[in-house]
């Protein structure tokens, strides 16, 4: 049986590993961080929202990966699988400060419609509504890891400086027949890859407990690096965001940013407050404030989205060793959850081609 090594245990790495296993191959994941670890900014997947919102624009390959992923997740919600417990069909309303009445990139989504003028909020000029899926990342990632292990997958928790370490059987591991790189933001500095087109887009969020929230809302602000979103999960937790700051490497939540996120989220969805607090405020003629949300806060967080100039990279490379050439499929470029199963399927095809 071919031995496949894979670097990275984020959403892209885990889904790719599972798709390669489905082809009948033995897979070992090499990673410094794993689901369930203490969170940090460089391991982005646990911090994600995550909901499915098509972002491909005019990029046909990206659109293909996003559609394949959405169809797979949507179908999963129709089953009674363990995975379906962490996926939730959820109505979404997205607002824009420009006229987007001709928007077509989302019209394939279930129950898609343009919002009526009476539904617009906060001075927005247009908006859309449709059904989509939210993912409870805190449970979904460990589930994927458990599934990988149950199928015979192996884990090596290591710090990798160069892909040579894996290709040459470092850490007393077997020399792999093929290496797959799903290193996320690490692809920028990983020796043997060093893709300087990869850069971070820092996202900051606040996780709150609000099981009464049953709708996603988002609004694209006039500032390029700000977007407000409210994403409920099947667990009853809700992610509030966010920021979109390019090349910002600050690895900790900024207090003032967290307060601004709470204020924007409350303005977008006043019903974010607990029903009893809303009722009490109404009775006392009191306006809602960020302080009313403080008891709901679980954690503040931030992560580095791995973006890439020129778009996603999913290709097969050849790496020369003293013992011969090795095929190295490389997969990275951001929007992990959006395209995860689609890019994983493509990566598995590259593995098959590399082995043959």
Image (tube, rainbow, N blue to C red):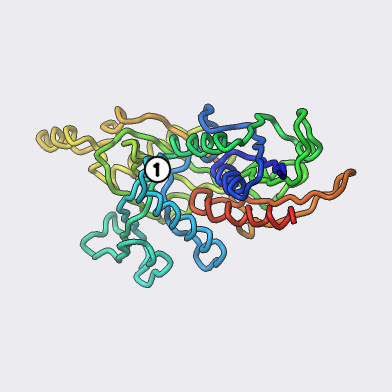
Dividing the image into 4 quarters, which one contains the C terminus?
bottom right
Which residue is most to the left? 283
The reply to whether residue 250 is visible in this rendering is: no
Q: Which residue position is annotated with label 1?
A: 81
Give above or below for 164 relative to 79: above
Image coordinates for residue 352, horizontal then vertical, percent: 68, 55
Q: Residue furthest bottom?
A: 102
Q: Can you say whether 63 is above or below 8 in the image? A: below
Q: Is residue 49 left or right of residue 116?
A: right
In-image side of 135 versus 248 (left or right): left
Residue name at image x 43 percent, y 67 percent: 105
Q: Quadrant of the N terminus?
A: top right
Q: Residue at x 64, y 43 (%)?
A: 183
SS class, disc 1: loop
Going by the image, does 214 lie left or right of 248? left
Is disc 1 surrounded by few (<14), some (14 to 19) or many (20+) residues within 10 Å?
Answer: few
The percent position of residue 273, horizontal first and vertical second, equals 24, 37
Viewer-proximal residue among 226 and 148: 148
Residue 140, can we see it? yes
Q: Where is residue 343, by image quadrant?
A: bottom right
Q: Position of residue 119 (x, y in %)?
A: 23, 59
């Amino acid at each position: 049986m071919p031995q496949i090594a894979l670097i990275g245990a984020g959403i892209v790495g885990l889904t790719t590993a599972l798709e390669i296993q489905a082809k009948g191959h033995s897979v070992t994941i090499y990673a410094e961080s794993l689901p369930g670890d203490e969170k940090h900014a460089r391991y982005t997947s646990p911090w994600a929202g995550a909901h499915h919102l098509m972002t491909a624009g005019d990029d046909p390959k990206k659109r293909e990966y996003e559609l394949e992923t959405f169809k797979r997740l949507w179908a999963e919600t129709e089953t009674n699988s363990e995975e379906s417990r962490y996926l939730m069909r959820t109505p979404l309303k997205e607002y824009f400060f420009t006229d987007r009445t001709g928007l077509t990139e989302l019209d394939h989504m279930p129950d898609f419609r343009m919002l009526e003028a009476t539904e617009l909020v906060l001075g927005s000029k247009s908006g859309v509504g449709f059904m989509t899926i939210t993912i409870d990342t805190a449970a979904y990632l460990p589930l994927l890891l458990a599934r990988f292990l149950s199928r015979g997958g192996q884990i090596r928790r290591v710090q990798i400086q160069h892909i040579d370490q894996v290709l040459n059987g470092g850490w007393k591991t077997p020399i792999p027949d093929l290496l797959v790189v799903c290193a996320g933001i690490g692809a920028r500095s990983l020796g043997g890859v060093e893709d300087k087109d990869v850069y971070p887009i820092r996202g900051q969020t606040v996780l709150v407990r609000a099981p009464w929230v049953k709708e996603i809302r988002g609004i694209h602000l006039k500032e390029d690096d700000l977007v407000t979103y409210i994403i409920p999960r099947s667990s009853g937790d809700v992610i509030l965001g966010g920021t979109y700051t390019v090349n910002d490497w600050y690895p900790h939540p900024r207090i003032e940013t967290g307060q601004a996120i709470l204020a924007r989220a409350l303005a977008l969805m006043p019903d974010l407050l607990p029903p009893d607090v809303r009722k009490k405020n109404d009775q006392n003629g009191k306006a809602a404030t960020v302080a009313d949300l403080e008891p709901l806060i679980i954690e503040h967080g931030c992560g580095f989205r791995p973006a890439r100039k020129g778009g996603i990279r999913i290709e097969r490379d050849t790496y020369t060793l003293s013992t011969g050439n090795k095929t190295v499929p490389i997969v990275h470029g951001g929007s992990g959850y959006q395209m995860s199963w689609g890019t994983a399927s493509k990566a598995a095809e590259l593995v098959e081609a590399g082995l043959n």
